[in-house]
């Protein structure tokens, strides 16, 4: 019975205090026919030592590849301090800070996080996290519909260049309330929205704009934002937080700035970890704060007038408002936000800018190297950030498989979402990639393509 | 004496943690100016030592399982094994990209697959998906599946979800997020659902019912089989809120009770850490009927290798709830825990969680506190009401809660479930010792004595924490949600 | 300038406050000809990211072998909690607890450690650590000479079965005070002292007795202890702390028990780590406490009568006593002791006993497997603990090299210290070794020996 | 309110951390009974949660660099990079057995070799050995080499080591451990060694001198070149106690000053953690003369691979000082630190350590405290004397020290060097901000004001720590060095 401290004497004394003969009595209210469950098929218990051996073998099996995939999750250097601090028991094993006085550590940190995120995005307020970037978009859409009191419609228009998985997730979630997402009627040219050829969007509650977009391309974001606002829509920005160290913050987009900003927080100190836990961030203008989902931390004072922090605006939340809450979210991704806050404090504005610039520079260099290979070429021109689509002379899936067999994860298969791109991959080289790594990839790609007769 | 100023207050222009950023950065000359930001982002500029010291110090201001008994009801704050943390953080797992090919993913997929199997066994369900990222998202997945099921049968009249009034707030909130209206079912005086009210509520509009059993009142719904029959006869499905599976793990299986779908909070029952708010993992289990609707991806085993089942394999799936595959790092921790416990260990979880709860309940009752359902067995948790103390001594449940902090105990859940006045919902969990529980009883008795002597003193608690009692009303009225540079106003917004 | 927080403004303001024109002024008392040093040859600074890459490559290069070596350092399972707690900043980055009130964490832990070590060894008092097992033996010898007021000699006799490296280290240290170690005049038979054939040792200040000894053999420790005591010597026990979960504690040896106990603490939760940092433990009878080297923690009370812990008997130490101190030791191995204390608390008496029993069982099993190979046989009979000498049909050094080339570290080459054992190895299989590992070793050894024509 | 009882007081017979021990253990039937222990060892029996909670809570009772400014003179409490810790604890390093063949050791040996080279460069010495396990063992190695050198030359008359009276206690203690007698040299009023006294002390009996420069008085010995000449002329060698190389790193090299041997505390200057008492690493550097005597093993590079130099390669070596190769885990941390700093970073260490020390010294002087050598530059540290405060206010250096703890600062070193009455030796290090130093000055001023108002209050400090001031006299008189089971007496021994 790992982790159970009871000795036989303890059990006996406790049952006596209860007045129960044996532990089974304690379950006597449960109908007999439901009890006596068999756990056959569940393996026998192992010691930590045995599990450690198993897990080390399994982790080692998945390790060692050289990774050039981005497509929503990015390999960055994570300072050692980040997780050495984040896994401290007091952060790691605390609950949601319901008793504010006993949770000032987490609460102050979250307040600092909120400040950092508003700083990055140029918005007024931030919540304390949602599950991940994609589900945060779903929440942002629901929020926009609630918040846009002027709009007489709940139409939501989504840029055709949004990450297709984000769209799928958003559809799965908002679809349950019979909200359908429409594609924004602007042609995609060169991997980005051609705002010059946009039709009038018609009235909408919200428009979803990614920057950079799925292909790594940068949108003409000012014009798009203004166009959306002209349609009476709120603008929901979907952004990469690392990119924001360089790119114009959503708060400055167009004439009035975006209204709601969301995205995936993973690049900020969160390990790739097969896709999670990450965290979704959500920022907005002050006016919409009461429509936000998720926890929000406020600064206040204690009985002696001393500064302190506490959960606030809880009347938006399910534990108070139940069926009228802004969302059903309860547990969020607190520990990830702890890591991200420490990461951002360590990097600071200049550090984060350098990371972004090096990522971008590395991806440019990688594309240069790969495009020196016969038949490999960029799919799009025009500005991009830290990720780029390349066309191959052979089907992407086949090439990627061969690369993987040689220990290189060469990119994301764009054919997955678009048959016309079955020979395209999306590549990314962050700041952890070296020139040597890129040369290795290029050399291997050349060989693989030759072997495939390209 | 020393406070911990905000990290922003410790910032100086130009200061940096120099080992942490690239030494040089190339010019970004290919991105047009109008797409670039003009001002650097408002992040603090501090040294590495400042960061380490600041966040180490902040951490010390938290209560946590690793430092205090934390009997927060409905939250299952039990020991989070350090082994789970260390093994889930092996570099091979941390560095795996979510889009890495299956060829490079067999290690992690083996863990996921085996956990799916284990969870199916312990819940008595036919299939498990690990993608929901917390309990509430598990609920969403479950109710969305119920909806998909009815829709697939063309049964569009079912617009209502039944929820007992004692239910956790996420239940009604989820039903609404799934496009349903909520119909509340009252609870009887004995803590069980009012069966007559249920009968009357059921009808062709009933999509299903969301139940926790044992309920959030800490007692086992004894007529569950009958309820299941009634709901099924009405054409509805049964959702099991298994956030707190600790009450029954290894003892009873929701599948056997007649439930069609269940979510589990791996961050409670399977002892992954709560991290000061998350992340969690709200794995769901389904009966045969709902198998086709499970959220993707799910891991399948074919011969000796594992592969992802996606929309292509499960075309009727409710789809994806996260960009990738859910909170795999959390799932790995749960897997390690499940393997350490094993069959025998798992069977003991509910047994000892229940033993601790009943012991503590009896000790508090014997000490003169009002146990709410005094003739019922406690499950893994139980409720006491401080209505009498409130009336006679003028000291509320919240005052007890705050004063407990001074005694070095985290407070139980306060004022939930909403049905019970001045209540504390107390969940000791199986990993605490008898001595710890005894210490808690002593503290409660001692606080009551303090209250009898000097109620103001108790109402002024806590005294030994970094702050005294905080003004939550002010927090909500004069919103101050972020730091602003000195001179830029006080950052507060009058609400 | 990593880790230096000063901005240019800071520097200017600080120099102004000092009244110095530039930082170089601050060094103006240093003769000019000594200043202006070049650091050519020191490589340029790297970011944490770059060093991390380098270190990961190097660590990976040394990893992956299957290890059956003991000979003074033992691979054990270390519960994850041990180092997750030990590396908490408050333990990790504190100094020696000179300000007791600000160091109650470390001090209470050390008091608990002292209690655990006296419990394991059956002695009255323990210090708070020395550098490692071998240097602890040197300190124990010096201590015994000081403590044995009755002896009119400073002769120190050392069992011939002591770990030869321990003897070398002790000689290097005590030799500086012109103390020479003599070998105890008892023949070694079957890898252990044949006490039946012992001569009268003659008067001595101390006798050093290992249990188990270098070969893993168990000595007839009661008789040896009594023999040493008859010679007026103090008995210094050199023991393995894991073994003490099973073996008779030195406090119970012979009629009167050992007088001083020392050894290597590494098996108690300390990673192999190429040989250090480990820690030496030192326990003794109460009467000798003032002769002990190293820090000692005592329990006392504060001004309010509340229990607290502090360094005590500091008058033995160099910072008070200077040239009259019991030793020059100052910094010890505090963090290792932190780990060991947590390890022992997690294992408890029954856990440690099981670890010892499984180690011993595994070594027995390994020897069984290896000795099934033609020409491989135990060098000694008689009781041993968790380590055993085997004779090979080929020179040990050659065999070990071949095994290493196949990723197996097959044991310790006994020829290193004794030409007559050039075909012998010392093997050890602790609780982390599986049946599969042992089969693999046996299979490989068979192949290697066949290839070598044995 | 809650204390932390000893782990033994939390023990219950039969309780265990079950995931941590083998599930079964074979019988030990081959070891004769008389060699086995009869009673299980006196270790606590507790659960895993109890252990985690207990030691987490204990840790919080420590001051540390990660939580407080820690200006402990002569100890160089600067930021210990978390990167050094993480990278030294990579499994490949942790799992390497000390007797692993060189074939499986090239990674770690590359690090050791490169650090040897770096240390040789920054100290200006010809060779480096990393084996000594702390400063004091480095001193031992150094003085033993001096001894071996004289002996090898048949020069057996040299029986004396000179040590300035200001020296660290380990210096005289080491000399004695190496079989020498100690001759103390007085310090002049200006903080430099009394050169006349040195001249008179030198003679054929002089084996060498142990010096720290800057001395433990915090000032640079200005006539060092002359001293070196005098000692060498007398046939002695010069030992440099480089525990606190932080004062000169990148600025001056002991080799250039004329020293023959030096030890460095990597746990100070190279920022490896002090771990609440250790481990350290006392690497030594030697000039050409002493190269043959270095302690083994040392790493050599041959073509592209590394090998250990042992007694066979260095037959005149003073031998081995540890069973294996010293505290390699500490050395790896120092290596990571050295690589992160690099050439440029290293040159800045002394510069900023000195800037901080002089700034703090000037601020305290301006605030009216008595800086001991007020006309001298501070090195990386400096001394103030509270003699006046002691006399006028009745508040001693120790009282200031204890009260500083309440203000959230670790105290400076007190009453060392022994030469200066009521002294505090203050070493701020280069990793602290100006703001932190200013805060310290404010605290000192504020304590002096408190002392003027109410000296008893300051004498009663600390007030905000887990315990008030401890009775050290009682601790030494009524020795209580271990827990004993209740009923077995109180464990105290009257001294
Ligand atoms: C009964 C019950 N249901 C649902 C939930 C929601 O789970 P989560 O917080 O993981 O979303 C909780 C957790 O607080 C709960 O206690
Ligand atoms: C000047 C000086 N010399 C020697 C030492 C001894 O070093 P260690 O404590 O590592 O043995 C110290 C450390 O306190 C010191 O400050």
Image (cartoon, coloured by chain):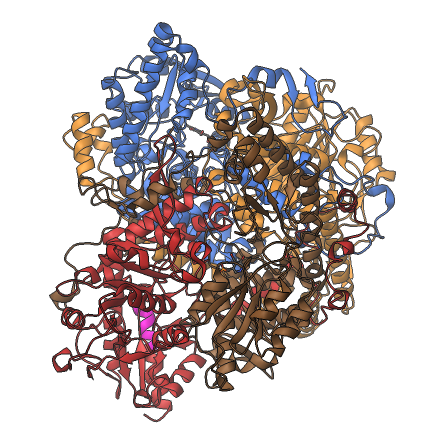
Chain colours: A orange, B blue, C red, D brown
Side of C160 relative to B278 (left or right): left
Q: Quadrant of ligand 1?
A: top left
Q: Nearer the viewer, residue A67 or D340?
A: D340
Q: For residue B120, which quarter of the picture?
A: top left
Residue C437 included in the magenta stretch of the image: yes
Q: For residue C122, which quarter of the picture?
A: bottom left
Location of the C terminus of chain B by quadrant is top right
Location of the N terminus of chain B by quadrant is top right
Check the image and report above or below for C49 versus D310.
above
Answer yes or no: is residue B474 visible.
yes
The dominant secondary structure in magenta is: helix
Q: Residue at x 25, y 66 (%)?
A: C148
Q: Nearer the viewer, residue C262 or D391?
A: D391
- Residue C267: x and y in percent read 34, 62
Side of C225 relative to B71 (left or right): left
- Residue A211: x and y in percent read 75, 42
Side of A311 relative to D322 (left or right): right
- Residue A277: x and y in percent read 54, 44
Residue B334 included in the magenta stretch of the image: no
- Residue D446: x and y in percent read 61, 30
Check the image and report above or below for A134 versus A97.
below
Q: Which residues are magenta?
A: C434-441
Q: Of all residues shown, which one is farthest toward the top? A: B392
Q: Nearer the viewer, residue B489 or A129?
A: B489
Answer yes or no: is residue B305 visible.
no
Q: Nearer the viewer, residue A256 or C175?
A: C175
Q: For residue D242, which quarter of the picture?
A: bottom right
Check the image and report above or below for C275 versus D383.
below
Q: Of all residues shown, which one is farthest toward the bottom? A: C453
């Amino acid at each position: 019975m790992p982790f159970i401290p009871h000795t036989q004497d303890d059990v006996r004394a406790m049952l006596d205090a209860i007045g129960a003969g044996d532990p089974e009595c304690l379950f006597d209210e449960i109908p007999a026919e439901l009890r006596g469950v068999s756990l056959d098929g569940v393996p026998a218990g192992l010691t930590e030592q045995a599990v450690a051996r198993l897990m080390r073998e399994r982790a080692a099996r998945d390790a060692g590849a050289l990774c050039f995939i981005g497509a929503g999750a990015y390999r960055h250097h994570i300072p050692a301090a980040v997780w050495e601090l984040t896994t401290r028991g007091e952060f790691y094993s605390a609950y949601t800070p319901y008793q504010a006085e006993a949770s000032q550590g987490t609460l102050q940190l979250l307040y600092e996080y909120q400040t950092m995120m508003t700083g990055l995005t140029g918005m007024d307020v931030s919540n304390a996290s949602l599950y991940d970037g994609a589900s945060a978009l779903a929440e942002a859409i629901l929020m926009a519909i609630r918040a846009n009191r002027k709009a007489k419609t709940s139409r939501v228009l989504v840029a055709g260049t949004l990450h297709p998985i984000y769209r799928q997730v958003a559809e799965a979630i908002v679809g349950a309330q019979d909200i359908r997402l429409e594609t924004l009627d602007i042609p995609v040219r060169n991997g980005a929205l051609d705002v010059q050829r946009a039709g009038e969007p018609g009235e909408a509650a919200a428009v979803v704009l990614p920057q950079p977009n799925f292909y790594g391309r940068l949108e003409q974001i000012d014009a798009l934002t203004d166009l959306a606002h002209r349609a009476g829509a709120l603008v929901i920005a979907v952004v990469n937080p690392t990119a924001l160290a360089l790119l114009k913050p959503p708060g400055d987009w167009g004439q009035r700035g975006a209204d709601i900003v969301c995205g995936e927080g993973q690049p900020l100190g969160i390990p790739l970890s097969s896709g999670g836990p990450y965290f979704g961030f959500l920022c907005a203008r002050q006016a919409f704060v009461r429509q936000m989902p998720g926890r929000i931390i406020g600064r206040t004072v204690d009985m002696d007038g001393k500064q302190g922090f506490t959960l606030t605006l809880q009347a938006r939340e399910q534990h108070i408002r139940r069926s009228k809450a802004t969302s059903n979210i309860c547990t969020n991704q607190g520990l990830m936000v702890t890591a991200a806050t420490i990461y951002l404090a360590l990097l600071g504005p200049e550090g984060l800018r350098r990371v972004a610039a090096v990522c971008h520079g590395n991806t440019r260099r990688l594309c240069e190297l790969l495009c020196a290979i016969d038949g490999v070429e960029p799919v799009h021109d025009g500005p991009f950030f830290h990720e780029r689509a390349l066309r191959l002379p052979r089907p992407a899936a086949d090439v990627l498989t061969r690369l993987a067999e040689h220990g290189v994860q060469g990119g994301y298969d764009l054919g997955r979402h678009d048959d016309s791109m079955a020979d395209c991959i999306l590549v990314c080289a962050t700041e952890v990639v070296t020139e040597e790594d890129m040369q290795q990839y290029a050399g291997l790609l050349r060989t693989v393509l030759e072997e495939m007769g390209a | 004496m020393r406070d911990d100023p905000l990290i922003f207050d410790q910032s100086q222009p130009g200061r940096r943690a120099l080992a942490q950023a690239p030494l040089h950065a190339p010019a970004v000359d290919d991105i047009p100016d109008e797409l670039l930001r003009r001002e650097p982002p408002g992040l603090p500029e501090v040294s590495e030592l400042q960061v380490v010291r600041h966040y180490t110090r902040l951490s010390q201001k938290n209560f946590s399982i690793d430092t205090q008994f934390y009997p927060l009801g409905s939250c299952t704050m039990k020991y989070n094994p350090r082994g789970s943390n260390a093994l889930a953080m092996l570099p091979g797992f941390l560095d795996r990209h979510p889009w890495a090919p299956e060829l490079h993913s067999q290690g992690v997929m083996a863990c996921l697959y085996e956990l799916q199997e284990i969870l199916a066994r312990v819940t008595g369900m036919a299939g498990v998906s690990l993608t929901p990222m917390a309990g509430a998202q598990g609920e969403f997945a479950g109710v969305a599946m119920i909806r998909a099921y009815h829709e697939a049968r063309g049964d569009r009249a079912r617009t209502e979800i039944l929820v007992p009034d004692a239910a956790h707030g996420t239940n009604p909130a989820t039903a609404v997020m799934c496009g349903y209206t909520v119909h509340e079912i009252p609870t009887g005086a004995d803590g069980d659902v009012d069966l007559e009210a249920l009968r009357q509520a059921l009808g062709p509009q009933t999509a299903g019912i969301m139940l926790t059993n044992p309920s959030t009142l800490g007692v086992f719904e004894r007529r569950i089989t009958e309820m299941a029959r009634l709901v099924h006869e009405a054409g509805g499905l049964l959702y099991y809120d298994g956030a707190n599976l600790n009450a029954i793990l290894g003892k009873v299986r929701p599948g056997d009770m007649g439930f069609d779908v269940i979510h589990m909070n791996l961050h409670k029952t399977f002892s992954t850490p709560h991290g000061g708010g998350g992340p969690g993992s709200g794995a769901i289990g389904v009966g045969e009927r709902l198998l086709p609707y499970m959220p993707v991806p799910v891991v399948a085993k074919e011969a000796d290798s594992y592969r992802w089942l996606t929309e292509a394999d499960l075309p009727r799936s409710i789809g994806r709830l996260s960009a990738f595959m859910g909170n795999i790092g959390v799932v790995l921790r749960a897997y390690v825990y499940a393997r350490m416990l094993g069959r025998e260990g798992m069977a003991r979880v509910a047994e000892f969680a229940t033993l601790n709860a009943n012991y503590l309940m009896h000790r508090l009752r014997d000490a003169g506190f009002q146990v709410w359902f005094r003739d019922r067995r406690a499950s893994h948790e139980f409720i006491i009401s401080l209505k009498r103390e409130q009336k006679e001594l003028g000291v509320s449940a919240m005052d007890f809660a705050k004063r407990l902090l001074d005694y070095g105990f985290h407070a139980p859940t306060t004022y939930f479930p909403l049905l019970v006045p001045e209540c504390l919902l107390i969940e000791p969990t199986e990993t605490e010792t008898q001595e710890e529980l005894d210490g808690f009883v002593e503290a409660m008795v001692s606080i009551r004595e303090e209250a009898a002597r000097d109620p103001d003193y108790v109402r002024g608690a806590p005294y030994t924490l970094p702050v005294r009692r905080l003004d939550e009303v002010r927090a909500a009225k004069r919103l101050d949600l972020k730091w602003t540079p000195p001179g830029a106003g006080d950052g507060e917004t009058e609400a």
